[in-house]
């Protein structure tokens, strides 16, 4: 297909029933970003609250993803990047509520990948630093969910020839074994003002998802296209693409980006090293001391007095 449309995804008449192989998208954040303001003036403050009720937002997502479900092939995957929203001190667990509505539509929940942003997120730990007492703990929000759903139907590798499978073989390298093979992906966000969009997701996300959940020649849909990151990556990987967005300016930028080279950054791979347990003599001496004192040592919490109970 290889087309981008300036219209809402609520009605995608251009796409036939059951013709999309993979959906990769990130819906607009609820009540967090004024996209129209950003289009009108990219330098203006666009993180405004418009007061849209949360329930209406979920209802709107239901309409959109019901239409997405219609276009998806049986057995096809739908990957949705979505995060918790903080508003007036309250956290709204959007990924959890989205999972409920998606299953009601008919999607099968497949799995969750956690996008750990590494260098960016919603800073909240300052509350705990200012008030270092129990009950004040508010950790920084450093993750979003990449929810993977599937439309009931045959596996996508069924009826694929051996030659087709080999042509789409996944490279099992160090990045795969240390990073992609896990359900936590360490990917830094796109730096502010690097691209003409308030919150573009990194190219590494659609790059991985498209390689993992589709074959060359497949049709990839992004119903919330933005400036076309999914379409750009899909084209570079030999897939067809189709996308929708209500902002005409974003569609124009998306077309311009289609032939740009991919911008895949060197990955930040977490390394975890085992700390050796203390030597046996140390452990034996500590256990002897514990028994003499009648105490148990809990790591990080010091000693706890053992109480003798009579069950006779």
Image: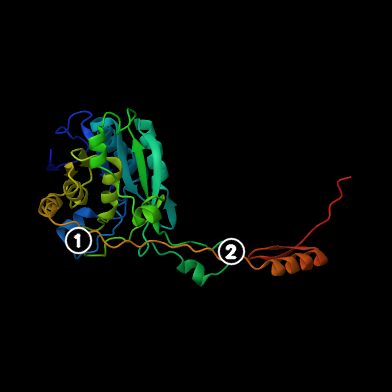
As measured in the structure, the alpha-carbon distance from the residue carrying label 1 to the one carrying label 2 is: 41 Å
SS at badge 1 = loop
Q: Position of residue 288 (x, y in %)?
A: 78, 66
Task: Kindly tell me whether residue 14 is visible in this rendering.
Answer: yes
Q: Position of residue 274 (x, y in %)?
A: 53, 63
Report the side of 278 relative to 206 (left or right).
Answer: right
Q: Which mark is residue 134?
A: 2
Q: Please identify the quadrant where the C terminus is shown.
A: top right
Q: Position of residue 21 (x, y in %)?
A: 24, 36
Q: Residues within 10 Å of mark 2 (few under 14, many from 20)?
A: few
Q: Which residue, given by chain and number where applicable, does mark 1 sit on? A: 195
Indicate which disc, 1 or 2, sits on the residue closer to the N terminus: 2
Total numbered labels placed on residues in the image? 2
Of labels 1 and 2, the one closer to you:
1
Q: Is residue 307 above or below residue 18?
A: below
**Quarter occupied by residue 119:** bottom left
Residue drawn at point x = 10 percent, y = 54 percent: 256
**Quarter occupied by residue 154:** top left
Report the side of 258 relative to 173 (left or right).
Answer: left
SS at badge 2 = loop
């Amino acid at each position: 297909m290889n087309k981008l449309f300036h219209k809402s995804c609520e009605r995608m008449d251009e796409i036939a029933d059951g013709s999309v192989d993979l959906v990769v998208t990130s819906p607009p954040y609820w009540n967090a970003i004024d996209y129209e303001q950003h289009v009108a003036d990219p330098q203006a403050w666009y993180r405004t609250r418009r007061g849209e009720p949360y329930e209406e937002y979920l209802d709107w997502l239901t309409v959109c993803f019901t239409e997405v479900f219609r276009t998806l092939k049986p057995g096809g995957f739908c990957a949705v990047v979505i995060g918790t929203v903080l508003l007036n001190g309250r956290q709204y667990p959007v990924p959890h509520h989205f999972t409920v509505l998606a299953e009601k539509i008919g999607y099968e929940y497949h799995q969750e990948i956690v996008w750990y942003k590494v260098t960016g997120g919603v800073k909240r730990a300052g509350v705990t630093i200012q008030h270092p007492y129990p009950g004040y703990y508010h950790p920084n929000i450093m993750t979003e969910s990449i929810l993977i759903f599937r439309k009931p139907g045959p596996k996508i590798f069924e009826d694929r020839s051996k030659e087709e499978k080999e042509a789409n073989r996944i490279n099992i390298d160090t990045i795969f074994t240390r990073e992609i093979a896990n359900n936590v992906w360490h990917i830094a966000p796109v730096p502010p003002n690097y691209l003409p969009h308030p919150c573009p997701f990194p190219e590494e996300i659609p790059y991985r998802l498209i390689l993992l959940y589709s074959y060359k020649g497949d049709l990839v849909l992004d119903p919330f296209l933005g400036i076309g990151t999914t379409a750009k990556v899909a084209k570079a990987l030999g897939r067809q693409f189709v996308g929708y967005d209500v902002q005409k300016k974003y569609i124009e930028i998306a077309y311009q980006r289609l032939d740009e080279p991919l911008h895949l950054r060197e990955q930040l791979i977490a390394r975890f090293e085992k700390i050796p347990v203390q030597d046996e003599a140390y452990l034996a001496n500590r256990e002897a001391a514990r028994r003499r004192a009648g105490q148990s040592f809990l790591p990080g919490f010091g000693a706890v007095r053992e109480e003798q109970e009579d069950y006779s």
